[in-house]
Amino acid sequence: MFLVSIFMRIHYIAAACVMPAALGAVDGVSYYNDIRPLLQVHCSGCHQAANKMGGLEITSYAGILKGGAKYGSSIAKGTPENSPLLNLVTGKLEPRMPMGGTALSPDVIELITTWVREGAEDDTPVEAKAPQVPAQPPKYAQAPTITGMSYSPDGSLLAVGGFHEVLLLNADGSGIEARLLGRSDKIHSIDFSDDGTRLVAIGGTPARFGEVQVWDLQSRDLVHSVTATSDTLFAGDLSPDGKRAVFGAADKTVRMVDLETGDELFKAGHHEDWVLQAVFGIDGERIVSISRDRAAKLADADTGAFLENVNFLRDKLYAVARHPRRDYVLIGGEDRVPYMYTMDRPRALKIADDSTLIRKFEEQAGKIFALAFSPDGSRVAVGGVADEVPIYDTETAKRVATCKGHQGGIFVIAFHPDGSRLSTGGFDGMVRSYDARTGEQLVSFVPVPIERAESSVDPEGTD
Ligand code: HEC
């Protein structure tokens, strides 16, 4: 419920932005409030940094002025009739934009025309221009919701996503080792490379941009900041060799990024709704993504080509985890039941076929938002709306321990690499660590420094 409310808020912000405030009253048209959201909705799919069709990037004012390959600047300030952008949306120039889509309504065209006639000013507020890395670590008046958390491979560090930062904590909660400040408001997943040299944080700022951050852990430098889509990115995974990251996005795509170069390798659009998580198979040659469209989909990790549906469709999926030693995936979501599937279908797919299902686990008291296998694969832990995190035996599906003490939803579960402990994080902003055998709580702490400052950030980062 909590995660869903966050999603709904993201959605609400996005929806609020696409309502042109000045529709009808076409005087004093604002680029930032009126034009930018329209272009984002109707045009950015083909004209954003990742795939500048016609050489045009339309998601920034600078991109519009710079223009595309054929016409140069897409607008002529003051003269709508000389502006390629307008001539292309009215059909005076071919091919009409949005290409292959429904023509813009006369109201919307009138709005853009007025903006250009009025001089096509850029009224983007300073703070909304290039989202900046904060100069100072943020000050917190309360603990921010935890949506990303991971142990380093040697078990010495626990990385936790804060607001505009990833905190590197001593794994026992005894202190902060480093604060990695970045542009994204929120981090939705954190992964260390197996050799412990890199940390990859995936997140973004709702309704603005998504980002993959690649950190060098020795120097604590940000090696790459790869931006993708105009909304936040969801959870992802690193390839076994640590060279690529796969993740899901609100634009229904699954994307792959090369962590050495920062290039986007592909985006795949097999889903019909937000893709909330993606994981690699054991050998790094296949990926499984899960979505609110209810499907877990298997795809080729080199090309993104769709291979087959993994699951029998039941209800919206919010989480996936891969078995550490086998090509098995554990999935869960709205219907509260964790299902374990094999990625390898034993016989040809039949519609409504469930032959890849290996095991079902106990129905939870609430929706599932987080799943994790223990490092040896013998246990699974399940978190979500329910105020406990049960641990099950992977083979028998029997509950072997229960971690208690949560208040509000659980969004992340991380096993310590030696398997002895597991930590949880979620809505209440507390990290709780448990004995993974008994479920006994060992320690709980707030991962960020809390200050009683008058000028504190909004911990939810809703702008
Ligand atoms: C489905 C993809 C798609 C969408 C959506 C789309 N475009 Fe395009 N756009 C293209 C392609 C492809 C070209 C290059 C066409 C050509 O040169 O033949 C292009 C070219 C352009 C150019 C000319 C760039 C240049 O100088 O060469 C402008 C301006 C433009 N689009 C504006 C828009 C606007 C405004 C929208 C939204 C209302 C939009 N486009 C939506 C695919 C798209």
Image: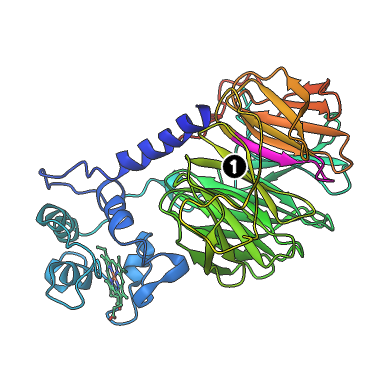
Using the image as rendered, state which of residue 123 and residue 144 is in the foreground. 144
Q: Give the color scheme: rainbow, by chain, secondary structure or one colour.
A: rainbow
- Amino acid at pointer 1: Ala
- Disc 1 target residue: 319
x then y, percent, for residue 184? 56, 46
Residue nearer the viewer, 128 or 159: 159
Q: Secondary structure at mark 1?
A: strand
Ligand 1 within 8 Å, label 1 CB: no
Q: Is residue 96 left or right of residue 354?
A: left
| Placement of the C terminus among the 4 image quadrants | top left
- The image shows residue 385 at horizontal and vertical percentages of 57, 25
User: What is the magenta range?
Assistant: 369-378
Q: Residue at x 19, y 56 (%)?
A: 115
Q: Residue at x 67, y 20 (%)?
A: 406
Ligand 1 visible in quadrant: bottom left
Residue 343 sits above or below residue 304 on the image: above
The percent coordinates of residue 267 (x first, y second) are 50, 65
Binning the other alpha carbons within 10 Å of mark 1 as few (below 14), some (14 to 19) or many (20 upward) gives many
